[in-house]
Image: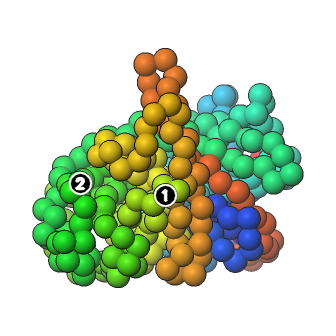
């Protein structure tokens, strides 16, 4: 006989103050110890960019442990799931922002989330350490993205990662960004035999910061409305190539998801902390819905919180 289980979850829109914009997220705030395969199948069923299962932390300094799934694979870290889950945990009283901050345990380790209090509070995650990867041929990138070589800025396309490898391609204007597209066949042309799955992030500098789009067919995501895990590396890339002002504390906004009708605003703050550079990515979260999923599983389960 199987075990009947009810799984309550919430959906929120992240990096927006308006319902039905931003990046939608499903959060199971009191998930039992489900098998990984079942979590993956649930994420595929919901078919959002990411679905989060909240579990008790293994670390005493963390408020919760997050397991994050796209429709096709688990991620060690992701931005809008971190921000959105922190909002849900605080909203439901599962976690408390001690000193205005809480730590969430993810595959990359503890991720700090800072709360800016107010009528509409903003949540900020601290980007994990950024690793630099290889450069890619500009002509190949322009070809697979369906834009001209002349549409690329003089900033060599490069792979960077703060947990999720992302190829950054800088374009000259919004029109070029809106024309860009890449699918699975295009990814096969880009990738070497030993390359792990990665995302492709196209953007152009703007007066406010950047106008961006992100494609992730390797993760079962045709286009992502808002990508917090790639926005920290975006700041690194833009500063390295002189595409953003870097005098004093650097602040800017990346507008993403507009082309697909899910306008998102990802705020970036870069500051010095001793000899280190800290990149924070922040945004608002808007509640959308609450629901219950009914499943029959083969084995009994332990509850979470």
Answer with mark 1 or mark 2, whichever residue precedes in sequence.
2
Residue 26 in the image, given as x and y percentages of width and height: 66, 67
In the picture of the structure, the residue carrying the numbered disc 2 is 155
> Can the viewer see residue 123 in this picture?
yes
**Disc 1, SS:** loop
- Point 52% across, 23% down: residue: 273
Label 1 to label 2: alpha-carbon separation: 18 Å
In the picture of the structure, the residue carrying the numbered disc 1 is 207
- Point 84% across, 46% down: residue: 118
User: Toward the viewer: 295 or 152?
Assistant: 152
Q: Is residue 294 left or right of residue 283?
A: right
Residue 157 in the image, given as x and y percentages of width and height: 23, 57
User: Toward the viewer: 48 or 299?
Assistant: 48
Looking at the image, do the residues carrying marks 1 and 2 touch, with CB atoms under 8 Å apart? Answer: no
Q: Which mark is residue 139?
A: none
Residue 130 in the image, given as x and y percentages of width and height: 37, 40
């Amino acid at each position: 006989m199987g075990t009947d289980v009810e799984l309550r979850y919430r959906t929120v829109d992240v990096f927006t103050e308006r319902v039905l914009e931003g990046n939608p997220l499903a959060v199971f705030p009191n998930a039992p110890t489900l098998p990984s395969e079942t979590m993956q199948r649930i994420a595929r069923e919901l078919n959002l960019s990411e679905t989060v299962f909240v579990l008790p932390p293994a670390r005493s300094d963390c408020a919760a442990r997050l397991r994050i799934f796209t429709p096709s694979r688990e991620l060690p870290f992701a931005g809008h799931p971190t921000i959105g889950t922190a909002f849900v945990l605080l909203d439901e009283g599962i976690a408390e922002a001690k000193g205005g901050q809480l730590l969430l345990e993810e595959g990359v380790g503890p991720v700090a989330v800072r709360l800016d209090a107010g009528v509409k509070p903003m949540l900020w995650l601290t980007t994990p350490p950024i690793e630099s990867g290889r450069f890619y041929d500009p002509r190949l990138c322009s070809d697979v993205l369906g834009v001209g070589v002349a549409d690329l800025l003089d900033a060599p396309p490069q792979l960077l990662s703060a947990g999720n490898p992302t190829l950054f391609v800088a374009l000259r204007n919004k029109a070029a960004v809106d024309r860009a597209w890449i699918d699975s066949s295009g990814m096969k042309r880009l990738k070497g035999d030993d390359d792990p799955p990665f995302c492709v992030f196209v953007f152009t500098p703007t007066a406010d910061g950047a106008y961006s789009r992100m494609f992730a067919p390797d993760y079962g995501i045709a286009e992502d409305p808002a990508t917090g895990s790639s926005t920290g590396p975006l700041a690194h890339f833009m500063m390295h190539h002189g595409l953003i002002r870097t005098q004093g504390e650097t602040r800017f906004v990346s507008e993403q998801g507009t082309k697909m009708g899910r306008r998102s605003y990802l705020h970036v703050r870069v500051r010095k902390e001793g000899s280190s550079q800290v990149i924070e990515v922040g945004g608002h979260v808007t509640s959308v819905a609450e629901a219950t999923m009914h499943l029959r599983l083969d084995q009994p389960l332990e509850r979470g919180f």
